[in-house]
Image (tube, rainbow, N blue to C red):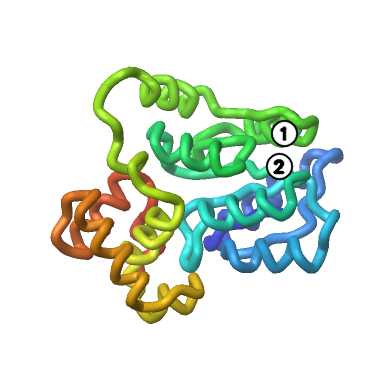
């Protein structure tokens, strides 16, 4: 299954993979919520998910965590424009078994699918280098200090969502969301949602296409 909120990306990947007889794209969806819904309704139908990160709604990070928790047999490969070590590390520890840059060649994507299908992992070379650099002794990234829930709230705030919308999506009270917002301001040393948005863009959590 291919999960991406851009029609051209989904259709393009499907067309490219159609050239390989041993790979079948059985579904295309445009959000993390739709990906989870498909898994729930078609249990056992998927071996691999190609997952984008920057999508409206819960996004790829939370979708990866939830799918891995409920359907551990599915290999999730992240396909992202972002290669900085902090974000790939969070996703790989959160259940992803592969990480590709959208700049990687099709042959490398096919190799990743094969390796993950066989039970292995695959990390593109450029991303592996960034992961190695991020593991060196030194100052800890602010992104690494955030809990999974704080990171999810950050992404939704950066998308321009209001507290009431975030609370409805996450099934939390508006007061709880306000508490998370205050924690984020403190941890990220920011004073406004605009500064939070800039932080999200800098760390690959958001691009211009996800802004509402």
Instruction: Name the residue tied to disc 2.
Output: 75
Specify the quadrant that holds the C terminus: bottom left
**Image location of residue 138, percent across then percent down:** 26, 22
Can residue 83 be seen? yes
Which is more toward the observer, 140 or 51?
140
**Image location of residue 196, percent across then percent down:** 24, 57
| Left or right of 180, for residue 71 | right
128 up-or-down from 105: above or below: above
Instruction: Name the residue tied to disc 1.
Output: 116
Looking at the image, is mark 1 or mark 2 earlier in the sequence? 2
Please tell me in which quadrant of the rendered image residue 7 appears: bottom right
**Image location of residue 74, percent across then percent down:** 74, 46
Give the residue displayed 70% in from the left and 68% down from the top.
Answer: 37
Give the residue displayed 37% in from the left and 26% down from the top.
Answer: 134
Specify the quadrant that holds the N terminus: bottom right
| Left or right of 81, for residue 38 | right
59 up-or-down from 162: above or below: above
Can residue 209 be seen? no
Q: Secondary structure at mark 1?
A: helix
**Image location of residue 66, percent across then percent down:** 62, 56
147 up-or-down from 194: above or below: above
Report how far apart the C-alphas of labels 1 and 2 lie in the structure. 6 Å
């Amino acid at each position: 299954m291919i999960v991406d909120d851009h029609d051209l990306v989904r259709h393009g990947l499907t067309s490219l993979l159609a050239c390989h007889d041993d790979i079948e794209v059985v579904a295309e969806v445009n959000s993390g919520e739709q990906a989870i819904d498909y898994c729930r309704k078609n249990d056992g139908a998927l071996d691999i998910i190609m997952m984008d990160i920057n999508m409206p709604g819960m996004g790829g990070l939370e979708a990866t965590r939830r799918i891995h928790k409920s359907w551990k047999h599915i290999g999730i490969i992240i396909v992202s424009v972002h290669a900085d070590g902090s974000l790939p590390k969070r996703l790989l520890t959160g259940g992803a078994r592969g990480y590709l840059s959208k700049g990687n060649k099709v042959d490398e994507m096919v190799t990743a699918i094969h390796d993950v299908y066989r039970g292995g992992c695959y990390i593109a070379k450029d991303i592996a280098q960034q992961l190695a650099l991020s593991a060196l002794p030194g100052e800890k990234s602010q992104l690494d200090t955030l809990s999974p829930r704080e990171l999810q709230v950050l992404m939704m705030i950066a998308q321009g969502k209001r507290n009431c919308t975030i609370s409805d999506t996450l099934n939390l009270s508006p007061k709880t969301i306000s508490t998370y917002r205050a924690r984020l301001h403190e941890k990220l040393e920011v004073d406004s949602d605009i500064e939070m948005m800039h932080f999200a863009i800098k760390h690959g959590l958001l691009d211009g296409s996800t802004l509402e």
